[in-house]
Image (cartoon, rainbow, N blue to C red):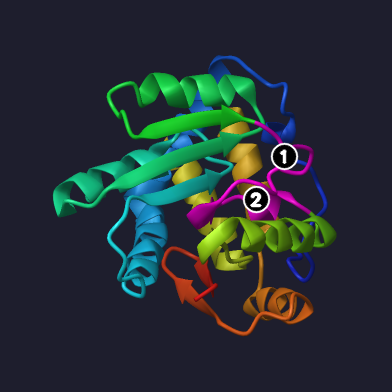
Amino acid sequence: MAIDLTQRTSENEIMDDFLLEGDELRGALDQISKINRFLGGNSITLDGVKKMLSNDNSNHPIRIVDIGCGNGDMLRMLSDYADNKGIQFELFGLDANRYTINHARSLSKNYTNITYVCADIFEEDFEDLSFHIVLCTLTIHHFNDENILNLIARLIKMSKLGIIINDLHRSKIAYRLFQTIAVVFRLNRMTREDGLISIRRGFKKDELVQFAKKLHLENYTVQWKWAFRYQWIISNI
C-alpha cells in the first residue's frame, strides 16, 4: 500500500492521551526503550550531551532535564555514563502522564540522582527553572508546528548550555523498516500503531532548518543519524 509522507500528519497517537494508564501503556513505553537501545537511538542524545559538555569548562554538577522522558531509559543511560566518567549529573525527567512518571520512578529506584516530575510544560510556569542542558528525545514530533516553535523558544530560556533534540526522519524506508520491526519484536497494538503515526509526524531536514530560521537561531546543527533520526543541537554558548 502506497503511503504519502509529503507532509507531516496531524493524526493523534494513542499515547498522546495524558490520562492513559495500564499494562498496554507500560508495555509500549518499555518496547520503545528496547527498540531505541537496539537501533542505537539513545546514543544520538548521549553524543549530543558529550558535544555540549566539550564546550563547558566549569567544574560543577550538570543539571539535565529530559522533556517527555517516557520510562526514563535515557536518564538512566546518562546516569550510568556519568558514573563511569566520574561526572556529576543532576537529572530530571518531565512527562505529562502521571502513570508514565510513576513507571519511570519504579524503574529508576536505584538511581539517586534522577528526579521525576509530572507536569505539562505548556501549562506549567517553568520560566524560573534553569538547567544546563535540555533534552527532547522523540518528543517534538508529538506537537504541531506552532507548538514546536513555542516549546523550543521556552526551552531556550531554560537552558544555559543548550538543547539537544533527537527525533524522527519522515521516510518511506523508515516506515517500512518499522513495520518489519513490529513483527520481529512482536510489538503490542499501541506501539505498532503509534510507531507508524510517529514516523508520519516526523521531519525532513529542511523543516527543522525552517524552524531554526523562524526562531532566529544562529548557533545550531542538524545532522541525520542512523536509524532515521535527526540530531538537532541548539547551543546557547
Where disc 1 sits, the SS reads: loop
Residue 50, compared with residue 29, is above or below; it is below
- How packed mark 2 is, by other alpha carbons closer than 10 Å (few <14, some 14-19, many 20 or more), is many
Q: Residue at x 58, y 38 (%)?
A: 192
Mark 2 or mark 1, which is nearer the start of the sequence? 1
Q: Is residue 69 left or right of residue 34?
A: right
Q: Which quadrant would the N terminus be assigned to in this image? A: bottom right
Q: Is residue 122 left or right of residue 161?
A: right
Q: Residue at x 46, y 27 (%)?
A: 104
Q: In the rendering, at what x and y percent does residue 54 appear?
A: 31, 73
Q: In the rendering, at what x and y percent does residue 188 appear?
A: 54, 28
Q: Residue at x 44, y 63 (%)?
A: 227
* Among the 4 quarters of the image, the one containing residue 2: bottom right
- How packed mark 1 is, by other alpha carbons closer than 10 Å (few <14, some 14-19, many 20 or more), is some
* Among the 4 quarters of the image, the one containing residue 94: top right
Residues shaded magenta: 119-143
Q: CA distance from mark 1 to mark 2?
A: 7 Å
Q: Is residue 67 left or right of residue 208?
A: left
Whether the residues at callouts 1 and 2 have beta carbons within 8 Å, the answer is yes
Q: Which residue is mark 1?
A: 13
Can residue 131 be spotted in the picture? Answer: yes
Q: In the rendering, at what x and y percent does residue 174 appear?
A: 54, 62
